[in-house]
Image: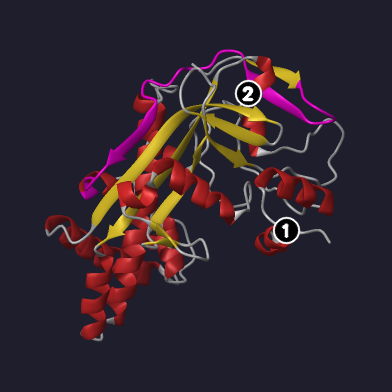
Amino acid sequence: MPALSIIVSITGEHRVTVKTQINKPNKLGVTVLKDYSLSILKNYIDWTPFFQTWELKGKYPSIFEDEKVGIEARKLFDDANKLLDKVISEKLLSANAVFGIFPANSAGDDIEVYSDESRKGLLTVLHTLRQQMQKTEGQPNIALADFIAPKETGINDYIGAFAVTAGIGIEKLIEQFEKNHDDYNSIMIKAIADRLAEAFAEHLHEQVRKKYWGYSSEENLSNEDLIKEKYIGIRPAPGYPAQPDHTEKPIIFELLKVEENAGIKLTESMAMYPTASVSGLYFAHPEAKYFNVGKIDKDQVLDYHRRKGMSIEEIERWLSPILNY
């Protein structure tokens, strides 16, 4: 059962909901999963974005009934599954993951990640951005840090981080297809690897909720329910609306030793390689939700520069799409 919640007042006009009872994770620290079963991941694929790759509009499986694109969608789906079955049977791709669950507390808009339950040794600090838009009265401007209990409450909270890939070995396949001038299957294998990586992120999050963290041990959801995110908790990724700063990725990669443990590299532009990879954070708060930070002002950029120890110019470069000046 999700923990009860109370509203706790934080500095200024920011308000957060803090859990009064928090599930201690069943397994703290870092866990590595190598060469994970693609047969399991196949069951977690959300096929709707696959059709979007091919510029076909419609939701799976109702897209097959569409008068305009139904026949083409069915052919693509059958071809994808034929190639996917070949990938699985011949082990043409490998899937790796690394994730960790750590003691944590928020300190303002930062999240302190601790090395153990004594909460004295600091492993790293995650930085979050807060909404600054005008809202109706009683609606707070939120940041991801609000979903972690503040240090001053004395409540012991936790945070998770993860990185998964299903793209190990894809270069060889793409090279082979391109050598044969087979553009269709070159695009197809990239689309399949992307779907498997997202499926891995979905499956791993379920395993964390039910087993490794265990705060939703009784959860029993269908794949459709998982796609609709009917579970407790979120897994936001750096670069997405709730945390639009890609430079938080190296912090996650260092925390989990991602390159060493999962074979995923981070490029200078903060892209992941293989591209069929997903990384982010786990929040278990029962009211945690995805949101859009939106535009931010110079005062927050200056605060963020102080918190992150990066130059203002560098921060403005990375956050240029959301600057309100």
Residue 71 screen position, x and y as percent: 35, 70
| Residue at image point 55% right, 16% down | 3
Image height of 188 relative to 236, above or below: below
Residue 263 visible in image:
yes
Q: Main secondary structure of the magenta part?
A: loop
Identify residue for label 2. 149
Where the C terminus falls, by quadrant?
A: bottom right
Image height of 293 relative to 286, above or below: below
128 or 124: which is nearer to us? 124
- Which label sits on residue 261? none
Residue 16 screen position, x and y as percent: 71, 27
Identify residue for label 1. 322
201 or 158: which is nearer to us? 158
| Residue at image point 68% right, 64% down | 317
- The first of marks 1 and 2 along the sequence is 2
Indicate yes or no whether the magenta region holds residue 16.
Answer: yes
Answer left or right for 60 relative to 323. left
Separation (CA) of disc 1 from disc 2:
27 Å
57 or 97: which is nearer to us? 97
- Circle 1 Cα neighbour tier, 10 Å, few/some/many (<14 / 14–19 / ≥20): some
Q: What's the residue type where badge 2 is placed?
A: Ala
Classify mark 2: helix, strand or loop: loop
| Residue at image point 78% right, 34% down | 140
Answer left or right for 62 relative to 193. right
Answer left or right for 290 relative to 38. right
Q: Which residues are magenta?
A: 9-38
